[in-house]
Image (tube, coloured by chain):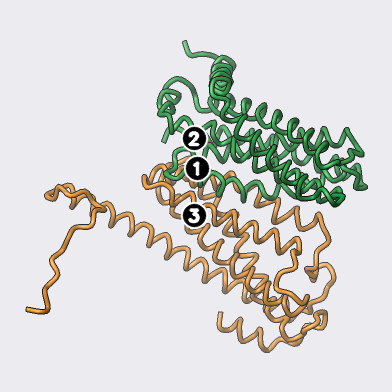
Amino acid sequence: MGYGIDLAFRAPNAMVFENKELARIIFFHLPCAWGSTLFLILAPVFALMYLRSKKRIWDLRAAAAMEIGLLLGVLTLITGMIFSDVEWGAPWNWDPRQTSFLLVVLITAAYFALRAAFSDPEKQASHSAAYVLAAILPELFLIAVFPRMLMSLHPDVVRQGGFDATYWTVIAVVSVSLLLTSGWMFGLRVRAGLLEEALENSNAKLGSRDDPTPSGVVRPVSVPDESR
Amino acid sequence: MPDSWSNEIGAVFRKEIQSELRSKSGLITSGLFGIVSVVAIAFATWTVKLTPTVAAGLFWITLLFSSMISLPRAFTVEEELGTGDLLRLMARPHSVFWGKVLFNLILVAVTAVVLGTLFLVLAQIHVANVGVLIVSLLGSCFALGGGVTLSGALVAQAANRNALSAAIALPLLVPLTAIGVSALRVAFGDPGVAAGIQAAIGLVCYGVVSVAIGPYLFAAVWKT
């Protein structure tokens, strides 16, 4: 990632933009958008695997993919707003691509609202998986169709050939490093989810063995009186 | 011998109709909300002539919120009244979903016709293309009926289901607003009949896909 950042600052100014120096934010904005889309496409695959196998690991993978997709989506919006402020004069222009990505982020955020509404792990997993699969249709529409329905301020640098080879090299390096970093985060999140579940199970067992207090109940503890 | 699909779907559909005729809760809630919204829009804009795009946007949002208030009830009411467990024993998930989605399609169609007529009269909107208006309303009913029923099914067993149903349904249905407005504004006088019909067909397709995948997703959550 450090090498990518170093390359980003060494790259020549992009001549197709108003603010040629700030165009470097593209090196992070584009990979974040691609990474977010990738994780939001992976999540339904994991959700489908959960519904077929009912193995908890697939639900944890789907949740981790949605979390990283949301994180990268928010980073895409933030970097886009910084660029938009300088390039188009305002951080938010109701540009179709900007708006559609905001809606994708909102659809992803609603997943966590639904997930938080279930305390039973099995219900939580199956409802979350069903939501992820239901959301894929509007998400694909927002990512692939809606931005092409209306005029957009977004520069179509790929078709216009606005970037030289150096820019594509830097974008490729940052994309690969971002993918590796987010893949590492994804693995960590899944392991953390497994540990959380193991901890809850062991708490439940401890609670049921020799303590009649149900797990999850906060037990009163004695606080030493410092005045004595 | 198990009942045929059509018998099961018919039984769930008749149950929904009878429940609705007894309580009239869904129709009254969505109808009243829609009528008040339309009256409020007409009252707030009586000094100005609404452009086709603004009129289409206001009407579609009214229809969207009316649907979101009434349609998820088909599932949430089963959990609130405690009748969900009996339904789980008596019918297969696909039949339950199809029975309820058929009822919701009729409910949203009645709401759309009543609201549409009121909106056109009170806000003095001129319909330039009746054909596109009918196809747009049909498409909107399909898309809203399919989408909101599915999101209602997803939140029915959640702890805070009433608040959650709007939070889940809105992000999923907001993209439809763009297509719905594209279709309706042509009906209200904007140029581009072919684009309007395309958008209306897009709405129908969205509804058909929601209704087609709905039973499978519903089956995954109904008996957990």
Q: Colour of chain A?
A: orange
Q: Which residue is mark 1?
A: B162
Q: Nearer the viewer, residue A222 or B101?
A: A222
Write down the chain letter for disc 2: B
Q: Is residue A37 above or below residue B42?
A: below
Q: Which residue is mark 2?
A: B76
Q: Quadrant of the N terminus of chain A?
A: bottom right
Q: Quadrant of residue B36?
A: top right
Q: Is residue B161 visible?
A: yes
Where does the image place residue A24, in percent across and percent down from the top left? 70, 81
* CB atoms of marks 2 and 1 within 8 Å: yes
Question: Whole-Å distance between the Cαs marked 1 and 3?
Answer: 16 Å
Q: Nearer the viewer, mark 1 or mark 3?
A: 1
Q: Amino acid at mark 1?
A: Asn
Where does the image place residue A54, in percent across and percent down from the top left? 42, 42
Q: Can you tell which mark lies on residue A112?
A: 3
Question: Whole-Å distance between the Cαs marked 2 and 3?
Answer: 20 Å
